Amino acid sequence: MTIMDRYEALYSHNIYPVHISDYLRGYCNDRYLLYSPLAGVMAVADGSDVDRMNRELGEHGVIYGEEQAMLHYNPPRPNFVTDPHDVFALTILPNNICNFSCSYCYAARGHGHDELSDGTIRAVLDYFIDPERLSRRDLYISFGGGGEPLLSWPKMKLALEYSDALALKHGFTIRYSFASNGSIMSDEIINAIHRYNIKTNISFDILEDVQNAQRRNYERVCHTLDTLLAHDITPTINSVITPLNVVRQCEMVERVHDRFPGLRRLSFDYVVDGNLFEAVEELKKFYDTYIDNFFQAQKLGMQYGISVSSIKYHNLEQIKTRACAGGFDLTPQGRFSMCFFVSSPQELLYDDFIYGKVNGDGRLEFDREKFRDLVEASENRRDECRHCFIRWHCGGGCLYHMKSYTPEMLDVMCNFQRKFSLIALLNKAEYLDRQARCTET
């Protein structure tokens, strides 16, 4: 009998017994993480306790004792939209022009000279910030994409000013962010960051030899960071973890602490290009090494008051029924993509992800059926997700990965995400346990 069959009563109530030694060495073979993600409750338990709870649920429909809190949850609310008319987050890719040549760039194939027109920007914002279109009044606009957005600062400035005026006119609140390679900064941009309270993200590999090998321009980015910090702007640093720096994540934290003591948020996300790995075993080894070094770096960061996170770590704070919430990503050609990873006709998955466009007369056209099919392609109700303890955080997996990775690579990625999430949850459970003991004393 498999663990899935043995604990069916628990699974049917969205309670997941995770046999820890299946993922981590050094744990007793009879220890489980008992996790109820929808209730936000977890505990480390012996197999006998898990058996008891499963039996109580199966026979009586309840759990006796402290663990009954695992049953107290509301059904998950959809985190996605099924029609472009309902989107509330817009990503604007002002151009596909880049002054860097990063070795791991997902958009390198699409680099060129395209740039959004002013008319397209206004047309999309008129549609997006429209009180007749949707009832909610909080929206989100980000700037990023296949090129360096700040190379098109006049376009970004237009979008900020125009969207801010529309928001004021129609009673909307808009949060802004941008992601930049850190090569461009000016007084005008700094003033805009303050004026619009723009969350600033700088892509930077921190270590000089790694930055110069993978992205170059180390001193240039350092100057930008110094400038931002001098103007009371604390950016988040987004570092891509590749085979070149995967074992140096603690060193990266040390470097930030020594060189940029004002920085407080680091995001260490693994590279998304599966072509960097010749074999599945090589990818698995990379993921295992990433996990070991990420959590060491996170622990070191806590000592320095530096938050070390990642997209996968952040996912544990969210409940998702589908991984793809419904992308509304405006490409430099005036097209709409489901994913900002895919923004140029030169990219292999372009036809798969593009579902709409802005016509020459400023009208927006959408293939609504394609939009819905793309969103529904990533969902957590597939058979292989049903017994997975991170199904409500993962949402069934990234559509871009599903279309660009082989089935064998996807299996490795799923196992990696489970192992990574298990360690994160165990660390949190240990912290909560320590807090409880402190409270008792």
Image (tube, grey):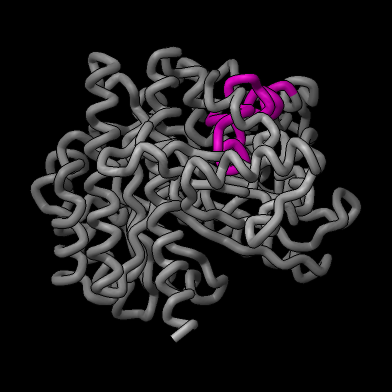
Query: What residue do we see at 85% from left, 51% from top?
Result: 134
- Is 121 or 422 nearer to us in this picture? 422
Residue at x 70% of width, y 34% of height: 9
In-front residue for pair 272/74:
74
Where is residue 427 drawn, in percent x and y? 38, 57
Q: Nearer the viewer, residue 287 or 221?
A: 287
In the image, residue 383 lies in the stretch drawn in magenta: yes
Going by the picture, which residue comes out furthest to the right? 132
Q: How many marks?
A: 0
Residue 383: image quadrant is: top right
The N terminus sits in image quarter: top right
Report which quarter residue 388 is drawn in: top right
Q: Is residue 88 left or right of residue 202?
A: right
In this picture, residue 85 sits left or right of residue 185: right
User: Which residue is rendered at x = 28% and y = 25% of the image?
Assistant: 284
Residue 104 percent across, percent down from the top left: 28, 32
The residue drawn where x is 40% and y is 27% is: 413
Where is the C terminus found, in terms of image quarters?
A: bottom left
Image: 407 above or below 60: above
438 relative to 288, above or below: below
Region rendered in magenta: 373-398
Q: Residue furthest bottom?
A: 441
Residue 80 visible to an observer of this rendering: no
Q: Is residue 428 visible?
A: yes
Across and down, in percent, residue 251 comes to 14, 56
